Image (spheres, rainbow, N blue to C red):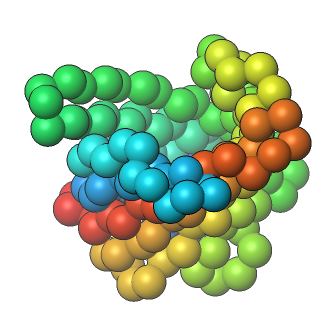
Amino acid sequence: MSAVKEARLKEFPVVAKHIGVWEGTYTRMDARTGQILDRHRSRLTCKILDDGSYWQQNEYFWDDGRTEVKQFPGEFKGKALHFDNERLIGDAYEVDPKTICLFWENKNEPGVKYAEIISLESDTHRCRVWQHFENGEFTKITVIDERKVG
């Protein structure tokens, strides 16, 4: 392991607990009605690379056979894990020994912002909640339940 990678793991101990492969389910709901808008399975791979940067790949799987793969490179700046890539811009912060808060915007969705809470229930189980805001209105919520598989 490189010295830079090792230093990042020590500087960001909560992020370090998320390194690995996580499988789970995303459920997106309308914030006003509770109606389920989308549900799909996922596989996320989270890494800190030897140069000290962050890398994440999300794979999504729908029951109708559709799939999607997205990659999210990031870098550590000060006390934040900062994202500014082709898809999103935002920052993630460790707020306690089991929680990360992430605030981001999808560059392909003008006027849409997200607030995400990532909570570790154990070393192998986490849940994430996204709050979706469109033009200042709370419109959707996404609940993600994941288990560490690698």
Residue at 39% from the left image edge and 84% from the top image edge = 122
* Residue at the extreme front: 33
- Coordinates of residue 6 in the picture (x, y in percent): 55, 57
Residue at 63% from the left image edge and 65% from the top image edge = 117
Residue at 63% from the left image edge and 57% from the top image edge = 32
Image: 57 above or below 126: above
Report which quarter residue 35 is drawn in. bottom left
The answer to whether residue 103 is left or right of residue 143 is right
Count the marks: how many? Answer: 0
Task: Work out whether residue 147 can be spotted.
Answer: yes
The answer to whether residue 133 is left or right of residue 69 is right
Report which quarter residue 59 is drawn in. top left
Quarter in which the C terminus is drawn? bottom left
Q: Nearer the viewer, residue 9 or 112?
A: 112
- Coordinates of residue 18 in the picture (x, y in percent): 46, 62
The answer to whether residue 9 is left or right of residue 35 is right
- Coordinates of residue 62 in the picture (x, y in percent): 21, 36
Residue at 31% from the left image edge and 75% from the top image edge = 124
The answer to whether residue 117 is left or right of residue 40 is right
- Coordinates of residue 13 in the picture (x, y in percent): 61, 71
Task: Work out whether residue 8 can be spotted.
Answer: no
